[in-house]
Image: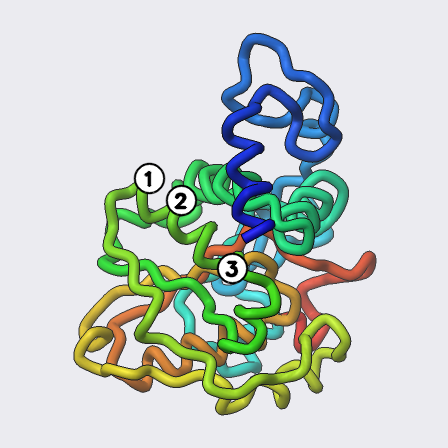
Amino acid sequence: MKSILTGLADVIFPGRCVTCGVVLGPDKTLHFCHTCFSRINFIQSPLCNRCGIPFNSPDGGDHICGDCLTSETYFSVARAVGRYETTILDAIHRFKYGGKIAIGEILGRLMADFAYPAFDIQEYSLIIPAPLHPKRLRERGFNQSLILALAVSKRFSLALDFTTLKRRIHTKPQVSLGGKERKVNVQGAFEVSEEKKIRGKSIVLVDDVYTTGSTVNECARVLTKSKAAEVAVLTLARALQPDSRSDISDQR
């Protein structure tokens, strides 16, 4: 309840940058001050056509990275708005761990603005947020991915399903694990409760942060196993190591 009231207060008393809190000028549409917005490191080409990891070299065009050529991916495409650092990192922490739900709605709209031309969300039939286990949902009070997905769904007037894909195993937090451990940690963690709601649907899976991609790939595996026609992934942030490059294994 406290997190909900905090979020409502942010709506009732707008006009400040969502990360640093400075009072904004007359144009509040971005919800970020100029300084904080300029610190967002948007992910741009050249990048991997599949997982969306940006390449170090600015030369050359988009192409499939080494990881996607050698690893099994169950999603057709994944894109993130920006790197998980500076402004986006601060905003996610205030939203996810500080209970600032209104910030999540703003970040969801940022995701919707970014999505096209990365891929055309209007060509898809269903939006699904990455689910939390009921225990973690009780602890946090809300599913951050659902808040983001709601904003994307409203923007494109697409159906939203937040009940069919379920997290059936309460796994360890991914943040404390390495790449291979993350993959093992989420194996078998998700399930589809009603296949008929998924069958034949083209789905946009929404999550907050893409680190190794283990979580979204396992979600996509379960969805495609339930006869989803396609699964695309849209996240707010991409967590990258300083030396990330296309030939590093297990970047998803």
- Residue at 65%, 66% in the rendered image: 211
Are the residues flagged by discs 2 and 1 in contact, CB closer than 8 Å? Answer: yes
User: Whole-percent x and y of residue 232?
Assistant: 39, 63
Give coordinates of residue 99: x percent, y percent: 62, 50
Residue furthest out toward the top: 26
Question: Which residue does the image show at 55% across and 41% down from the upper left?
Answer: 7
In the rendered view, does 105 fall on the left or right side of 93? left
Which residue is drawn at the image coordinates 61% and 84% (left, top)? 171
Q: Which of the two residues, 200 or 126, is positioned nearer the viewer here?
A: 126
What's the amino acid at mark 2? Ala
Q: Classify residue 210 as left or right of residue 118.
A: right
Q: Which residue bears the numbered disc 3?
A: 142
- Total tally of numbered discs in the picture: 3
| Residue tagged 2 | 151
Task: State the separation of the CA atoms marked 1 and 3.
Answer: 21 Å
Q: Is 189 drawn above or below residue 132 in the view shown?
A: below
